[in-house]
Image (spheres, rainbow, N blue to C red):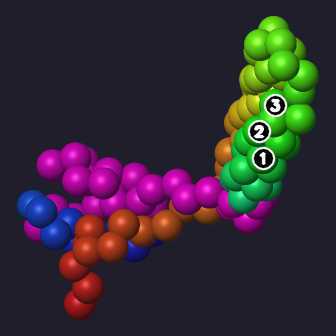
Amino acid sequence: MALVVCCDCDGRVSEKARTCIHCGNPLLEDRPGVIGMGLRFVYGLFCIALVVVVVLAASQAGPRPSERLMIGLIGAGVWFGVSIAIAVLLYVTRAGRVERVAGAVKTA
């Protein structure tokens, strides 16, 4: 087990420690993995496409305001359902990679 030196307090801590045991300086942090980044990208595209579809459908709706309201409500329901599904997938695949915080330790 190698030791590293904290930049804030000059304390020696294990290279696997997430925070400095002396001052609490963060040394390691979780970063999203490839699956998490892909899901975020797909979700962004989905949101943009859904807004476009709802706006186009509302513009094609009849003259009654209730039709436009129903299209908006259906769009909101679809968005909510997909958002919950994506959130569950992100939670299940949350184990990404652990990286050293830049400038957290002194190098010799």
**Image quarter (top left, top right, bottom left or bottom right) of the N terminus:** bottom left
Report if residue 58 is visible in the image: yes
Q: Position of residue 101 (x, y in %)?
A: 36, 66
Q: Is residue 55 left or right of residue 62?
A: left
Q: Position of residue 19 (x, y in %)?
A: 32, 51
Give the magenta-colored segment's residue range. Answer: 10-39
Q: Identify whether 92 is placed above or below 64.
A: below
Magenta-drawn stretch contains 89? no
Magenta-drawn stretch contains 22? yes
**Image quarter (top left, top right, bottom left or bottom right) of the C terminus:** bottom left
The image's mark for residue 80 is none
Please report contact status of discs 1 and 2: CB closer than 8 Å, yes or no. Answer: yes
The structure residue drawn at horizontal position 90% and vertical position 22%, both measured from the top left corner, is: 62
* Badge 1 density bin: few <14, some 14–19, many ≥20, Cα 10 Å: few
Amino acid beneath label 3: Ala
Q: Between residues 54 and 103, which one lies in front from this camera angle? A: 54
Amino acid beneath label 2: Val
Task: Quote the CA–CA distance across marks 1 and 3.
Answer: 10 Å
Task: Quote the CA–CA distance across marks 1 and 2.
Answer: 5 Å
The structure residue drawn at horizontal position 26% and vertical position 85%, both measured from the top left corner, is: 107
Q: Position of residue 53 (x, y in %)?
A: 84, 42
Q: Is residue 45 left or right of residue 22?
A: right
The image's mark for residue 55 is 2
Q: Position of residue 99 (x, y in %)?
A: 49, 67
Amino acid beneath label 1: Val
Q: Quick one: SS at disc 3? A: helix
Q: Quick one: SS at disc 1? A: helix
The image's mark for residue 52 is 1
The image's mark for residue 58 is 3
Please report contact status of discs 3 and 2: CB closer than 8 Å, yes or no. Answer: yes
Residue farthest bottom in this picture: 108
